[in-house]
């Protein structure tokens, strides 16, 4: 089911508010503050994606001490 523009705005607002909560309490926050099933599912989907993205970026983040390996192998054009 596609969300209406108003539902998307509500989902965005709830998602942003949920991010301000501790990770352990986000799902409770969403359940208590969102009574529209479609919006709640969207917020939960966004939170899962956000969490997965953070994990992925945390693992792939290069060390900040010196040039990255990607910079080291890029040839310069003359």
Image: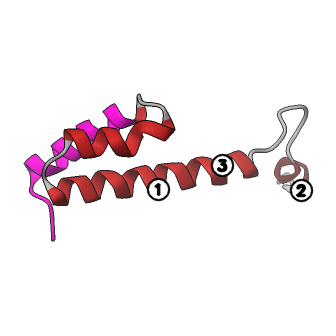
Q: Position of residue 59 (x, y in %)?
A: 74, 51
What segment is highlighted magenta in the picture?
1-18
The prevailing secondary structure element of the residues shown in magenta is: helix
Q: Is residue 63 above or below residue 39?
A: above
- Tag 3 near tag 2, CB within 8 Å: no
The scheme the figure's colours follow is: secondary structure
Q: Is residue 4 magenta?
A: yes
Assess disc 2: are there few (<14), some (14-19) or many (≥20) residues with their C-alpha within 10 Å of its C-alpha: few
Q: Mark 1 sits on what residue?
A: 49
Q: Are marks 1 and 3 in contact (CB under 8 Å)?
A: no
Q: Position of residue 16 (x, y in %)?
A: 34, 35
- Tell me the residue at 13%/53% (across/down): 36
Question: Is residue 2 visible to the viewer in this orientation of the structure?
Answer: yes
- From the image, tell me which residue sits under label 3: 57
**Visible residue check, residue 78:** no
Task: Name the secondary structure under disc 3.
Answer: helix
Residue annotated with mark 2: 73
Q: Within 10 Å of the Cα at label 3, are there few (<14), some (14-19), or many (20+) other Cα atoms?
A: few
Q: Which mark is nearer the camera, 2 or 1?
A: 1
Residue 66 is drawn in which quadrant?
top right
Q: Residues within 10 Å of mark 1 (few under 14, many from 20)?
A: few
Position in image of residue 17 (x %, y %): 32, 32
Give the Cα distance between marks 3 and 2.
21 Å
| The N terminus sits in image quarter | bottom left
| Spatial separation of the CA atoms under disc 1 and disc 3 | 12 Å
Is residue 58 positioned above or below 3 on the image? above
Q: Secondary structure at mark 2?
A: helix
Please, is residue 27 above or below residue 52 in the view? above
Rendered location of residue 32, percent (x, y)? 23, 40
């Amino acid at each position: 089911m596609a969300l209406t523009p108003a539902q998307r705005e509500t989902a965005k607002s709830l998602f942003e508010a949920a991010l301000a909560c501790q990770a352990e309490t986000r799902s409770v926050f969403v359940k208590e503050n969102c009574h529209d099933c479609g919006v709640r599912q969207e917020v939960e989907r966004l939170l899962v994606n956000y969490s997965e993205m953070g994990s992925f970026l945390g693992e792939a983040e290069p060390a900040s001490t010196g040039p990255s390996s990607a910079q080291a192998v890029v040839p310069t054009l003359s």
